[in-house]
Image: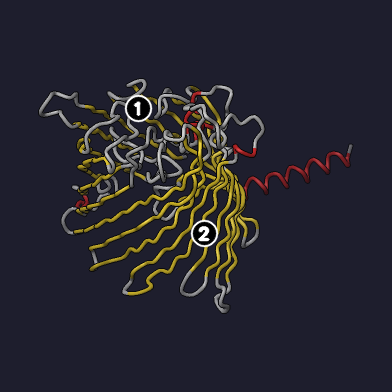
Amino acid sequence: MKRLAVFLVVLGFAAAGLVSALDFGGTIDNTTGYFTNGVPPFDQTNKLSIWFNDYIGKNLFFDTQISGNYQNQTTYGGGYVGLYADLDRLSLEGQFTNPKRDLRVFGFDVGRFPLVDPTSVIYNQSIDGFNLTFGFQPFSISATAGYTGLTIKPSSTIIMSAADLNGLTNTSQYFGSPRVVGLLTFTAPSLLYQQDLTLSVLAQEDMRPFFPNNGLASPGDTVYSPNTGGAIDSQYFTLRVSGPIVSTFFWNGSFTFESGSMLSYITAASQYEYKPILAYLAHGGLRYFIPAAMNLAMGLEADYASGDPDFVSLYGGNSAGNATAFIPITQGTLAAVFSPQLTNLITGTLSFSIKPLSRLHNSYLSNLQLELKGIPFWQAAGNIVSNPGNVNTPIYLGTEIDGTINYRPVSDLGVSVSGGAFAPKGYFSSGAPLQYGVKMDASFSF
């Protein structure tokens, strides 16, 4: 009994030491909104996150976050609705420095962690894999590879093919699109005249063809399968430059060439054939700050995502010749109400933001921020844009005006109220209905 008592005391001290070394906390997030084009219009999303992290020695860092979630709708009208649990992050990070050597920094990250490509609009989602970072002077190289097929559907935004789209409403499918993703990035900060240069290669491959009974179409199939289609594999080569023009005036520009292959149903041949992907995405942006004028920030951005006139669907819908429509890997949000996929699309954004109480020098009031955006949309190839109800519309799609009030009185509490209205083509001339919505986001950390 004495030995057992001593063992329990030692175990108790060890557990207490471990708990005291751990840093832990949590966040409660709520989104409540109403959108006339929503499915259903009323939107309710809640998330409770608990995180733990700890340093292991001087060079290693363990980080994990789990969450419980509730949502009553999904963006595309299908997928999971209700309660679900998720593993947001589980990773071991390491960083080793030696300023006296050519390789000054070596870092790694293994497990589940967020991955964002240099444009932030082609891939922006967690991945299960590894990252290696090599920091030289004056540049760095980063290599990442991983798998997306262990991400549950409510947390996955990968919708590239008909099989991806069909998986959203397939109740027997629990995980998102199964793809292998790799990203190689070269970054040279302040390379010339304080301009940052980034070169990257991003690639993804659909793993379904390697699975038995995958249901995908095969080359030579003569029966059109709109619910599954064929595989899409793609590569993205990006050049990005950004930096200051003067002290408070900044710019950024990027160009991405997309290559790859798409198994498409070719109408003239009446069968599925692999066709090359030859598409591109161009982006440019300006940002001007006037700190003395209530921290005024003005922005102007433009994006051009190439299209394909013979696409019969955004999801592997090429029907003749090369596939020239740009297809991002993950879905993003372009505006509050009308937010189509960044495919066959031209869009611009004019934005203004101020902090009207910043001169009060009051920490509880100075963080109040007001934002206003104007966002027009056009089709690049005049065929199809991914928002429901806008198939085969004219080149000009409409314009959206969005407004946001952000308020974070303390670091652990934040509230945002935003709304928008999209006036489609024909709103003024033929009475096309106005689409609008409003939502409130609240976040509390503990």
Residue topped by disc 1: 32
Based on the displayed image, in which of its 4 quarters is residue 87 positioned?
A: top right
- Count how many numbered circles sit on residues in the image: 2
Quadrant housing the N terminus: top right
Q: Contact (CB < 8 A) between labels 2 and 1?
A: no
Q: Residue furthest front?
A: 269
**Image spot of residue 214 (x, y percent):** 61, 31
Q: Is residue 227 above or below residue 200?
A: above
Q: Residue at x 64, y 39 (%)?
A: 210
User: For this view, does 374 lie left or right of residue 170?
Assistant: left
Label disc, if present, on residue 415 of the rendered structure: none
User: For this view, does 309 lie left or right of residue 12?
Assistant: left
Q: Residue at x 45, y 24 (%)?
A: 78
Kindly state the secondary structure of the residue where label 2 is placed.
Answer: strand
Q: Residues within 10 Å of mark 2 (few under 14, many from 20)?
A: some
Q: Residues within 10 Å of mark 1 (few under 14, many from 20)?
A: some
Which one is nearer the viewer's eye here, 158 or 140?
158
Q: Residue at x 24, y 53 (%)?
A: 361
Residue topped by disc 2: 184
